[in-house]
Amino acid sequence: VQLQASGGGLVQAGGSLRLSCAPSGSIFNGDPMGWYRQAPGKPRELVAVIFGGGDTNYADSVKGRFTISKDGAKNTVDLQMNSLKPEDTAVYYCNQRHWGTNYWGKGTQVTVSS
């Protein structure tokens, strides 16, 4: 399993960014896929996950602002981030849980300026 993440960058508070994760396999293979983030000096935390059946789960801190979805045409799992806050600044990692093993993409930096 290989994961390619893209879409990070610098944005002002209140702005939007969209992250994309392209796995080496199909996004419809039933594996849970999600986004995690890690800010300096803090542990990695779950941001959002989408399960094989399409159910989603979000960290409380991003509910109502972030949306995780699957794009079948591009075979990507996307994270739409709106109303960004400085505290969203972190390195964001794509994750796929395949046969009980976690796989990670290279992180993509998201920086939100105040």
Image: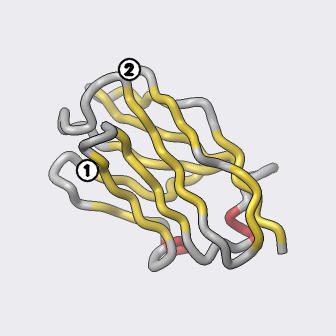
Q: Which of the pair 5/62 is nearer the observer? A: 5
Real-space CA distance between mark 2 and mark 1, rounded to the nearest whole angstrom: 17 Å
Residue 112, by quadrant, is bottom right
**Residue type beneath disc 1:** Phe
Q: Residue furthest front?
A: 73
Judged left or right of residue 103, residue 40 is right
Residue 1 got which mark? 2
Figure label count: 2
Residue shown at the point (59%, 60%) measured from the top left: 17
Q: Which of the pair 39/75 is nearer the observer? A: 75
Q: Residues within 10 Å of mark 2 (few under 14, many from 20)?
A: few
Q: Residues within 10 Å of mark 1 (few under 14, many from 20)?
A: some
The correct choice, above or below, for 94 with respect to 53 in the image is above
Dot 1: what SS?
A: loop
The correct choice, above or below, for 18 with respect to 96 in the image is below
Residue shown at the point (48%, 62%) measured from the top left: 80
**Residue type beneath disc 2:** Val
Residue 108, by quadrant, is top right
* Residue 39 screen position, x and y as percent: 73, 53
Residue 51 got which mark? 1
Do tag 2 and tag 1 residues touch (Cβ < 8 Å)? no
Q: Residue furthest left?
A: 53
Tell me the quadrant of the picture where the N terminus can be found.
Answer: top left
Judged left or right of residue 107, residue 62 is left
